[in-house]
Image (cartoon, rainbow, N blue to C red):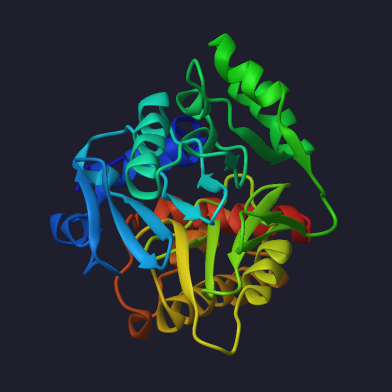
Amino acid sequence: MQYISRRDFLSRSGSCAAHIALAAAFSPRLLSEGWARTPAGPIAAREPFGSLERIADGIWALVSTPLSGDRTTLSNGGIIAGRSAVLAIEGFNQPAGAQWLATKARELTGRWPTHVAITHYHADHANGIAGYLAPDQHPAVRATEKTRQLVLQRNQPADTARAAALAAAVLLSATEPTTLDLGGRAIRVVPRSGHTESDVSIEVDDASVVFAGDLFWNGMFPNYVDAIPTKLSASVQSLRKLRPRVYVPGHGAVGREDDYDRYISMIDDVEVHARRAHSRGIPAPEAAAAYSIPAPLGEWTLFNKAFFDRAFTAWYRELGV
């Protein structure tokens, strides 16, 4: 396994895109091949960067497979169709990713996306937003004010089309769910936080489907670079429903209750160990170096000790260094 120092790791991996790039470098081949597990439904389209899976009537999940090296999308996304409108989820890493999803939406539903929702500001979810724009197509971009602000400030869009699309975004409430009527199908966009200052989940109650963004990483240790761990835990717990539910993560295969519960158990375990180490005065790097995911929780893609370092650092930031 290639070695990288803590300092180099932290300087090179300040985004989810870099987090995933390092996954390709560090993940064992077996875990890399297992990124996209058995599809959750029929495959509507497949590309080197991912596959489009039908997970319910009028709902498709784009499961990205970035460990192949193709960085067109990087994050997951999806399509939700109603009788009169179509929602596309995420802007992806490159405009080509958004354009591809929009084209597939038209093939599958007869419509170019009328709405686009971004779950949070990270580049792999937002930087390709201009790909949804066409000479005769200008879908309404939906994002919280904080997400739009962070994209423009931190991602620093160089292309004017992306900046213009975000500047014209329809702002979502940061405190109350926003309902989108797609025609016979109501979508709830629920403001949350934890992975970043401003996350949203996109929930389809009639189909019991939730697009969780990076609040959920299925089988992959999450990126804590901007995390507020207590809020992350609260948001993740609030998305867990007693009835059966399909969870589309920000990264990894589409999951169900068992997958989601395993994720909850993992982030809870990180919390227990971080709080214990902090109370004993153990420095975050030392505590992270001693941590390992319990064997009963199975294998997790992208696990190198430096990723634990970031998680423990986030917890110590909240608890007080």
Instruction: Locate residue 216 relative to residue 195 in the image: left or right.
Output: left
Residue 119 percent location from the top left of the image: 60, 47
120 to the left or right of 53: right
Examine the image and state in which quarter residue 43 appears.
bottom left
In this view, the residue in front, 127 or 161, is 161
Number of marks drawn: 0
In this rendering, the answer to whether 267 lies above or below 138 is below
Front residue of 83/240: it is: 83
- For the point 24% across and 41% down, which residue is it? 25
Q: Residue at x 31, y 47 (%)?
A: 23
Check the image and name the residue furthest to the bottom. 242
Residue 124 shows in the view: yes
Q: Position of residue 221 (x, y in %)?
A: 43, 60
- Residue 209: x and y in percent read 51, 70
Residue 253 in sight from this viewpoint: no
The quadrant holding residue 30 is bottom left
Q: Residue 186's spot in the image, x, y percent?
A: 65, 63
Residue 263 versus residue 108: which sits nearer the camera? 108
Q: Is residue 255 above or below residue 136?
A: below
Residue 253 lies, with reference to residue 81, above or below; the image says below
Image height of 127 relative to 304, above or below:
above
Residue nearest the viewer, comparing 184 with 17:
184
Image point 55% across, 88% down: which residue?
243
